[in-house]
Image (cartoon, grey):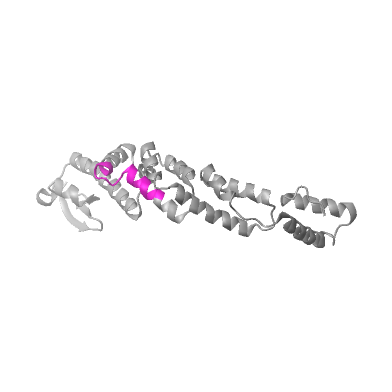
Amino acid sequence: MKITKYEKKKNGIYQVYFDNGNNVDLYENIILNYNLLIKKEVSVEQLDKMLEENKKYIAYNLAIKYISTKMRAKKEIVEYLKRKEIDNTTIDEVISLLLKEKYLDDYSFAKSFVNDKILLSSDGPSKIRGKLEEFQINDESINDALSSFTYEIQKEKVEKIANKLVTTNKTKSTSFLKNKIFNYLYNLGYERSVIVEVVNKLKFSSDKDIAKKEYEKLYKKLSRKYSGSDLEFRIKQKMYALGFNNYDN
């Protein structure tokens, strides 16, 4: 087959036209490697080989573009290329090349990921560890990266979250609120010792004052529909839900 024309597209791709009416898209590197600008003629077997190599360039450039927006883990690249219907052999070749060129690096990814989470989220170390494990980052890289999430940083973030919860839960009893704060922070992935230290230093409003105020609000609201023992039962139910288990007006 004889090449009749080259038409430049974008991203280093050329559309190559043949005298049999067919045309293919080839990366510039393929054209140069096979010296097509000079000989301008290829066999069917050579074209098949070029197209096979071209698949690698396509996958590689897709990966580079995907990485350019932010750092990616190896697992992310593999899943992304699979979504683009790249075959496993080509994916393996591209991943090997990206690792060799340092575009993929578990340690650098883990460090960047941890720093972003510290700055931009409320996640604690355990939760971050779990997310890095989902990315299949090795344990050594995870441990090294999480060393930057110090006890002091944890404490500062826990204090901020805990104080906000105290402010937004003024109708709850002290015991109820302490449990809520502890469970919330523990589920965010913070160390138990940090949470306990912070929670034990928090200042809470008087349970008696809160209970009296909530009882009066509930009485005013529920007495419009209920009365007698039925009213008292319903108020007690609501008071229990707020953590006032032994409140007796």
User: Magenta part mainly helix, strand or loop?
Assistant: helix
**x and y, in percent, of residue 84 in the image:** 37, 46
Residue found at the very far front of the displayed protein:
201
Report if residue 182 is visible in the image: yes
Q: Which sits in the foreground, 96 or 31? A: 96
> Does 85 sit left or right of 48 as displayed?
right
Q: What's the residue at 53%, 43% (across, down)?
A: 193
- Residue 76 appears anywhere in the view: no
Location of residue 201 in the rendering, given as x and y in whole percent from the top left corner: 58, 51
Indicate yes or no whether the magenta region holds residue 120.
no
Is residue 242 placed above or below 138 in the rendered structure?
below
212 relative to 67 in the view: left or right:
right
Report the quarter where the C terminus lies. Answer: bottom right
Q: Tell whether position 100 is magenta.
A: yes
Of all residues, the one furthest to the right in this rendering is 228
Q: In this view, does 132 lie to the left or right of 61?
A: right
- What is the x, y in percent for residue 220? 81, 62
Where, by quadrant of the figure, is residue 225 drawn? bottom right
Query: What residue is shown at x 57% (from left), y 54% (from top)?
Result: 162
Measuring from the top left, give residue 144's x and y in whole percent: 37, 42
Report the magenta residues as a range: 97-114
Q: Which of 133 and 211 is in front in this view?
A: 211
Along the viewing direction, whichever of 15 and 248 lies nearer the viewer: 248
Residue lying at 87% horizontally and 52% vertically, measured from the top left: 230
Which of the 4 image quarters holds residue 50? Answer: top left
Is 204 positioned to the left or the right of 149 in the image? right
Which is more toward the observer, 167 or 241?
A: 167
